[in-house]
Image (cartoon, grey):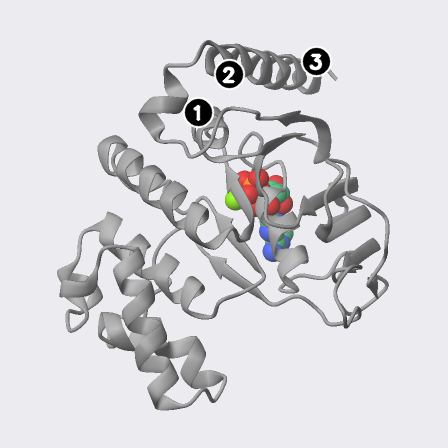
Amino acid sequence: MDGDVSTEAGAAKPSRRGGVPAISCEGVTKRFGSELILDGVSLDLTKGSFTSLVGPSGCGKTTLLRIIAGLEQADSGDLITGDAKSSSPGVRPSLAVVFQQGSLFPWKSVRRNVAFGLELAGVDRGTIAERVDRTLEMVHLTGTAKKFPYQLSGGMQQRVGIARALALDPDILLMDEPFASVDAQTREELHDELLEIWERTRKSVLFVTHSIDEAIVLSDEVVVMGARPGRILRRFDIDLPRPRTEESARILPAFADLHHDIRQLLVSSTVDAFNA
Ligand SMILES: Nc1ncnc2c1ncn2[C@@H]1O[C@H](COP(=O)(O)OP(=O)(O)O)[C@@H](O)[C@H]1O
Ligand SMILES: [Mg+2]
């Protein structure tokens, strides 16, 4: 990370959930012009854990994700990366990002879209072919490798985006409302697919959404953000049994309780912000 944000690698502090942190930010502050967007945000992403960031539109979720991804510069704060237990602390974890929509190259086939990051990294052709096949299979798109994005539904395009990120085999997967633009039924199918992929890969995931349901179904931990300025309100451990499906999670009484608590918190913080 550039600028005033220092990046330390291999810091040995345990994450708040008690696991090894994959990446943490401490006291991250960001302004756009005179507006304070993020106000001292601290967030740990536990290694091998699925963390969701939930909050109202405009509270700074994307800005925080972009800072973590190194696509945006914070004004102050620390980004602490690296695995303290690894034999080579100091190695920055690799990151891949899945965006909301429209991030595919329209002139490239599905296969070439998925291969893109690997080609850029200079990976040899045999390895690329093998990785692309494996990730397309993971997102159930094996039959569409030769198609172009315009020939696919919105849900399929998002699966190509996920395959492209997974093909890089990143330590950390950052996802910014990847299912926001697909219909409700497709979104549920994509949740089940992502849950299955997570079971297979156990990636450290930071998933940004404004859907409370989506956050609970997918996550080990839900971090709730408030707006104006963007800040962390509370974190919720989601101890619903795994492996999960959309259906198996939703029918649990604990799901309804968590939904209620998170919603209450968001509603009261929005009212507070409105009255401020
Ligand atoms: N590049 C930018 N320049 C100026 N303001 C921005 C920029 N990016 C985001 N913002 C503002 O920062 C706030 C947070 O935006 P964002 O991080 O996209 O929120 P969220 O993802 O939670 O909806 C919004 O008020 C938005 O208008
Ligand atoms: Mg956003």
- The residue where tag 2 is placed is 259
Estimate the x, y position of residue 221 in percent, counting from the top left: 61, 33
Secondary element type, mark 3: helix
Cα–Cα span, label 3 and label 2: 24 Å
The disc labelled 3 sits on which kind of residue?
Answer: Asn
First in sequence: mark 3 or mark 2? 2
Per the rendering, the mark at residue 236 is none
Identify the mark nearer the N-term, 3 or 1. Answer: 1
SS state under label 2:
helix
Task: Please state which amino acid type lies under the numbered disc 1.
Answer: Asp
Please tell me which of labels 2 and 1 falls first in the chain.
1
**Which quadrant of the structure image shows residue 3?**
bottom right
Quadrant in the picture for the C terminus: top right
**Badge 2 amino acid:** His
Mark 3 or 2, closer to the camera: 2
Image spot of residue 262 (x, y percent): 58, 18
For residue 139, above or below residue 41: below
Does residue 33 appear in this view? no
Identify which residue, 216 or 252, lies in the foreground: 252
Q: CA distance from mark 2 to mark 1?
A: 7 Å
Dot 1, crowdedness within 10 Å: few (<14), some or many (≥20)?
some
Is there a contact, CB below 8 Å, between mark 2 and mark 1?
yes
Task: Please give left or right for residue 48 compared with residue 259 in the image.
Answer: right
Q: Quadrant of residue 95?
A: bottom right
Q: Quadrant of residue 59?
A: top right
SS of the residue at dot 1? helix
Of labels 3 and 1, the one closer to you? 1
Residue bearing mark 3: 275
